[in-house]
Image (cartoon, grey):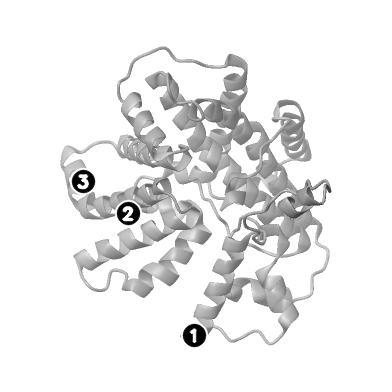
Amino acid sequence: MASVAGMLHVPYSVPALELLLPVGISFYTFQTLSYTIDIYRGSLKPEPHLGQFALYVAFFPQLVAGPIERASRLLPQLRQSVVFDYARVTSGLQLMLWGLFKKVVVGDRLGVYADAVYNNPDGQSSWTLWVATYAFAFQIYCDFSGYSDLAIGSARVLGYDLMKNFRQPYFSQTITEFWRRWHISLSTWLRDYLYISLGGNRHGTLLTYRNLMLTMLLGGLWHGASWNFVIWGALQGLFLMTSRATLPTRDAIIARLGLPTLWVRLWRSVVTFHLVCLSWVFFRAATLPDAVHILRRAFEFDGALMLNQQTMAHAVLGVAALLLVETAMERYPAAVDRFAAAPTAVRWGALYALLLAVILAGVEDSSQFIYFQF
């Protein structure tokens, strides 16, 4: 078209589109796949109403980045009539506010630092790379779990219940537990429709390890067709295999040493978190050579730490608030219900504090959600 327009001396400024894909294609592909497989297995009856099925596939709160819903959970809800419920609506709005806080106050603020370092890894000190990796670990968590909170909260306002997608994953004590807490809708999808279909753990240790590795490799490829994501998936598979193989021995050693339970839990959480951070390097680095350079440089442990004090001060305060809330939720599962029953001054004070934090401390030019690209 451009060459023809040039020959005719007609201005042509329409940008070329190499590939045009529907919004959220990977997520509603997963939902339709699970629907089809459930029908094939006989665990679900086909939905006779085309409109109900289309609404299930393209339910707008979670269309772009999940959670990946199952037809057995969402379709029955879509058939029911919804009436206004003040408690449900306020609960949904509060969850949306918390998700917005995680995204623009914590995640995007950390992203400013992580992007500056990871987009220019050459010449960075090892300590700077470590801090940037920690920053990205919390950035991707706050970004994605913040989106999930917004999706679940908005669906709740409308009268629908979406599955929980994150459950304090950085408190996990093993990689296996991490994947039970991180992107729960994807990890359970991969477990139910890929890992179990491959044989799961029903045919011996070697085949179990093979199934774990294949599942995580395909999970990595789902995020993107590049060596970075392949290695990220392979590392997760290797960590899962190693964790499964060594857990009995580690438990026996700890029991023999008689260490305090709190120390053991803390040590395991720290180790698991750093293994996850190691894999995040491949997830975030622009290229495979960049990821190799970052890892090699990080373990030299030298150089000065370069920080933007104002940016990091806001981020640290945000992370501290996040960890405070999530520690309460981890240790006291009924903390959310207790907050709902707290005195009015306490509840509204906390909500106004969150709202002010979003307005005053949020990143003005917020980036799009990370998982919009997958």
Quarter of the rendering containing residue 133: top left
- Give the secondary structure at mark 2: helix
How far is mark 1 from mark 3, CA to CA?
41 Å
Looking at marks 3 and 2 on the same chain, the residue that comes earlier in the sequence is marked by 2
In the displayed structure, 76 sits above or below 255; it is below
The image position of residue 188, as x and y in percent, is 46, 63
Q: Which mark is residue 40?
A: 1
Q: Which mark is residue 250?
A: 3
Q: Residue at 49% across / 85% down in the picture? A: 40
How far is mark 2 from mark 1, CA to CA?
28 Å
Looking at marks 2 and 1 on the same chain, the residue that comes earlier in the sequence is marked by 1
In the displayed structure, 255 sits above or below 218; it is above
Residue kind at label 1, given as amino acid type = Tyr
Nearest to the observer: residue 167 or residue 214: 214
Looking at marks 1 and 3 on the same chain, the residue that comes earlier in the sequence is marked by 1
Q: Which residue is mark 2?
A: 237
Dots 2, 1 in contact, CB < 8 A? no
Q: Label 1: few (<14), some or many (≥20) within 10 Å?
A: few
Between circles 1 and 3, the one closer to the viewer is: 1
How far is mark 3 from mark 2, CA to CA?
19 Å
Q: Is residue 139 left or right of residue 237?
A: right
Q: Label 3: few (<14), some or many (≥20) within 10 Å?
A: few
Residue kind at label 2, given as amino acid type = Gly
- Give the secondary structure at mark 3: helix
Between circles 3 and 2, the one closer to the viewer is: 2
Q: Residue at 59% across / 26% down in the picture? A: 315
